[in-house]
Structure formats: C-alpha cells, structure tokens
Image (cartoon, rainbow, N blue to C red):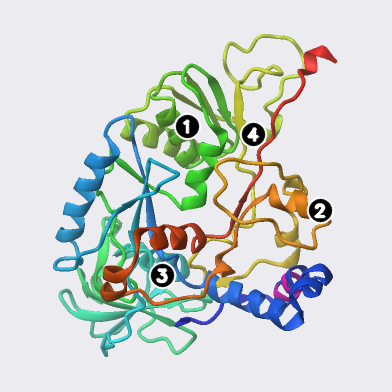
Amino acid sequence: MSVFPKISLRLEVENYLKKSFVNEEVVSALGKQEAERKFESLLNHLSHPPSFTTVRVNTHLASVQHVKSLLLDELQKQQYDGLSVPVLQHPKLQDVLLIPVIGPRKNIMKQKCEAIVGAQCGNAVLRGAHVYVPGIVSASKFMKAGDVISVYSDIKGICKKGAKEFDGTKVFLGNGISEFSRKEIFSGLPQLKGRGIRMTEPVYLSPSFDNVLPNYVFLQNLPSAVVTHVLDPQPGEKILDMCAAPGGKTTHIAALIDDQGEVIALDKIPNKVEKIKQNASLLGLNSIRAFCFDGTKALKLDTTDTEGEPPFLPESFDRILLDAPCSGMGQRPNMACTWTLKEVTSYQPLQRKLFAVEPQIGGAGMMGAGLSSEQLKQLQRFDPSAVPLQDTDIDSLRDARVEDMIWLANKDCIGFFIAKFIKCKSTRDS
C-alpha cells in the first residue's frame, strides 16, 4: 500500500520515461491501461523502501551462520526487542542475509515539536538510520535535548537551513529523541557531527547498522550483491574493478576468492579511493590495491611495462567488473529527483548491450528496446513494480513461508540491471 507520494520528477523526465515504458510493444502485449498502471506503480515503488534490508557477510573473517546469530542478537538490542523478526539466508546467494522491513506503521502519534531533514538523510532514515546533525535542516524554536520530536523529510530541498518552521512539502518519517537543543545544532560548532536525533518510532522499522558488526557485514542492496556472483571470481585470479568506489563489489570479489589473488580497484576521485582502502582494511582484505585513476583510460596502447599500476596492457586481467555510471534513479527510497532530461539520457550509450548471466534472479528485459523475445530472456532486470506495494507486520511475518519471503526479497528491491561480457577470442590472435 502506498503511503508516500510517487517520486517527484521534472515533467520532461516523467514524460520521457512514460514514453519509454508505455511503448508500442508493451501496449500491444499488455494493453494501454495495464502498461500505464505498471508505470505508475514503478513511480510509487521508487518512493518506498524495499521489503528487506540486505547485508553481505564477510566470509573471509566469519561464517554466515555465526554472523546470522550475531545479527539476531543485535535485533533484540535495537527496536526489535520483543518482536520475533527472522534473519534469512538467501538460497542462491549464500553470503547474503535478508531482514524483513516492518511497516509502514500508521499508528505513530505526530508531535508538535518538529525537525526537518534533507532528502538524502530522510532516505537513510527510512532504511534504518538515525539522524545525524549535518542532515538536520530545520527545527522548532523550542526544541531542546531530550525532547520527543517528529522528523520530516524536505523532499524538494527548499527548506532554509536553520528555519524555525517549514510549511513546504514534507514527508513524515517517524518520531525520535533529540540529542541536542536547536541552539546547539545551529550554533555552527564544528564538533557537532554525530547523531542528532535517535529514531525511536520510525515509520519503517529497519535495523540500524551504525557501527554494527563492521568487520563482518557490509550493507548492500540485493542486486549489487548479485553482480559479484555473476562475475564468479576464482582464487588466484587477477581482477579489475573499473569504477569501484565505495568498494562494496571490490571487497565482495576479494572475499569470494578468500583474499587469494589480486584485486585492482580504480576510481578517479581521491576521497572515494580512500574509502575503498578503508573498507578493505576494515574487512581484513589484503588482496585489494586501489588507485586514483580514470577507468576510461585504463587501457595502455604501447608496450611499456607500468609495473602493476594503471594503465594496463590488453588482457592483463582474468575478469573485469564495470559498474558503469548511471542515473541511480532505481535507488529506493527516492522521493524526488531534480535531474534534467539531458542528464538522465546521458548514460544510455553505456547501457545498451546486455548478455546472459548467472545466477538468474532478476526478470526478463523490458519490451520496446528492439530486442527479440529470446534476447529479453537473457537479461537480468530488477523491476520494483513487479509486485504490489504491501504492508508488513509481525503477524504477516509469523504466517509467511520462507520461500515466499525470499521470492519477495528477489522482486521488491532497487531498480537495477546486469550485463555480462564473455571474451570468446584473444585480441592477440587477431
């Protein structure tokens, strides 16, 4: 059931997307009314969080069963106290654990004291995060430390920093307890960078992973975890991750090869490269080497040896993972996107060719892209609108079959697609 407005887009972008999704081939197969319904359903799904929180276990340091046990203990320490929420191991992705998201919860009493947070902060809150001071945009003039306050998201980004009230478009995220007074939050003290509001009654109840088992788990969307299994890295191989930050897939590669091999990670932004190195160190992975380098220039055309640093000679790697730049519009929850049509369409040249992949978890490709029915079956597309939005409570979890919950986790995730290229012939033989 939809509780938030559908994602807010520029009219030119929404019209362009609608034309793409409600194309002649789709209309011919489904009918115009059903095609339009599916498109509206997609826009509604994007503003809501997925049905499950997905974490990847760092199998290099711990077994999945051990981490699963630790997570169950952690849930009892958090807001799940007294609620029997399962932690499921994905049957096809053995290093992935799934935790059902409870909500939306509709009986939360709104408070007179309010805080407004930015859109990105609001998205994080809906997936289990607390509110940190930099994310707070506005607070009621009488707010003090210890107050129970209602938290709202300014999804259009128009609230002025430090405002005492806000009458614009805002979405209720739940209640929490303020760690600071309004004066302390907006005094400009540089040391105030920690948690500003501890969420106690969120609309969606998801586990917080703030400093929770940091060496053992990596918070990662299900399709992102699928990618590295599709790559299927093997111990002893040399593997390149071309656009690697913040290192989720890089560290996954290293874990799957049990840190036995060489994983080269590239990103052209220095602080993002440092983040890759930090994640590798935190997870105890020594096979990763990260370089600040533009992946589009990673191929070395002359034969001069660069001694293991980019650029690289042709056929230097056993496998290559390319998480190509994209609009990110499939991220959930996402209540508003201010991108222009030019920005949205700028990624298409990178996303045209898709090939067969394993494991096959996502659905077939979207009709209307000029592909045959057999080619569509070779794609792996994660479409959030594939299932209706639904409420989850403890009673429904108690009665649910594990198989049904896994099916829902596979369907109700972020929007995503994967392509796998297999080298059939060496370029040196040409």
Q: CA distance from mark 4 to mark 3?
A: 32 Å
Of callouts 1 and 4, the N-terminal one: 1
The three-letter amino acid code for the residue at tag 4 is: Asp
The three-letter amino acid code for the residue at tag 3 is: Gly
Of callouts 2 and 1, the N-terminal one: 1
The span shown in magenta is: 14-18
The three-letter amino acid code for the residue at tag 1 is: Ile
Q: CA distance from mark 2 to mark 3?
A: 41 Å
Which of the numbered marks, if any, corresponds to residue 372?
A: 2
Tell which of 7 and 111 is nearer to you: 7
Residue assigned mark 3: 122
Q: Position of residue 194 (x, y in %)?
A: 26, 58
Residue 186 shows in the view: no
Residue assigned mark 4: 294
- Please indicate whether residue 100 sits to the left or right of residue 272 in the image: left
Circles 1 and 4 in contact, beta carbons < 8 Å: no
Between tags 4 and 3, which lies in front?
Answer: 3
Q: CA distance from mark 2 to mark 4?
A: 35 Å
Q: Secondary structure at mark 1?
A: helix
The three-letter amino acid code for the residue at tag 2 is: Ser
Tell which of 310 and 123 is nearer to you: 123
Q: CA distance from mark 3 to mark 1?
A: 31 Å
Of callouts 2 and 3, the N-terminal one: 3
- Please indicate whether residue 212 sits to the left or right of residue 33 in the image: left
The residue shown at (77%, 21%) is 425
Is residue 15 magenta-colored?
A: yes
Circle 1 crowding by C-alpha within 10 Å: few under 14, some 14–19, many from 20: many
The residue shown at (83%, 71%) is 24
